[in-house]
Image (spheres, rainbow, N blue to C red):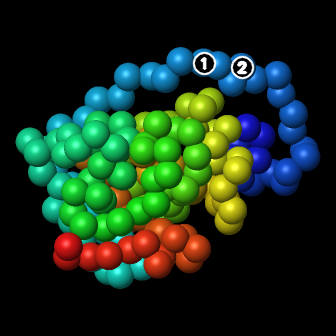
Amino acid sequence: MVRARQARRGTSYGEAMGGLNPYLGQQAIAVAKQAFTLRIANSGQSIAVDPAQLPHGRDGRPGSLLDILLHHGVRVDHACGGVCSCSTCHVVVKKGLKSCNPADEGEEDMLDTAPGLTGQSRLACQCVPNGSEDVEVLIPAWNRNAIAEGE
Ligand code: FES
């Protein structure tokens, strides 16, 4: 749970330790109420997100990046089915991170197991944009083979 926080703060691994409770409950997150665009930096694909259509499915938090990406044919690994129990849905939110819910303890813990962690890393299944600004995500290189558009 330390590495993800340090990446966000710009500190290095090992500088901070803490007695954080890994068993905190998940917060309720509101689905976006306004339209926004979700852009995939890898492909340049832009998805017009209609809040009236959210949530799309059952993978990840309702209205999460994973929910939106899967619905629009962008395959993102999600080994645990979007319940914050792996880190295979790791994405980098290059733009619009402030419009997303903050990562909770459980997400931070899982992010610590993700390779290539950055200060803008999120689990796609846990990251829910509120629609106040457009969002751009980068799907890390090790996950790019899973990208399939227009299915
Ligand atoms: S799919 Fe497993 S943590 Fe997101």
Name the residue furthest left: 52
Q: Nearer the viewer, residue 31 or 34?
A: 31
Q: Quadrant of the N terminus?
A: top right
Q: Position of residue 5 (x, y in %)?
A: 70, 43
Q: Amino acid at mark 2?
A: Asn
Reply above or below: 141 against 89: below
Per the image, the residue denoted by label 1 is 24
Ligand 1 closer than 8 Å to label 2 CB:
no
Give the residue drawn at x 29%, y 58%: 70
**CB atoms of marks 1 and 2 within 8 Å:** yes
What SS does tag 1 mark? Answer: loop
| Image mark for residue 21 | 2
Q: Is residue 73 visible?
A: yes
The residue located at (22%, 57%) in the rendering is 71
Side (left or right) of 1 relative to 122: right
Q: Is residue 60 left or right of residue 30?
A: right
Mark 1 and mark 2: Cα distance apart in space: 6 Å
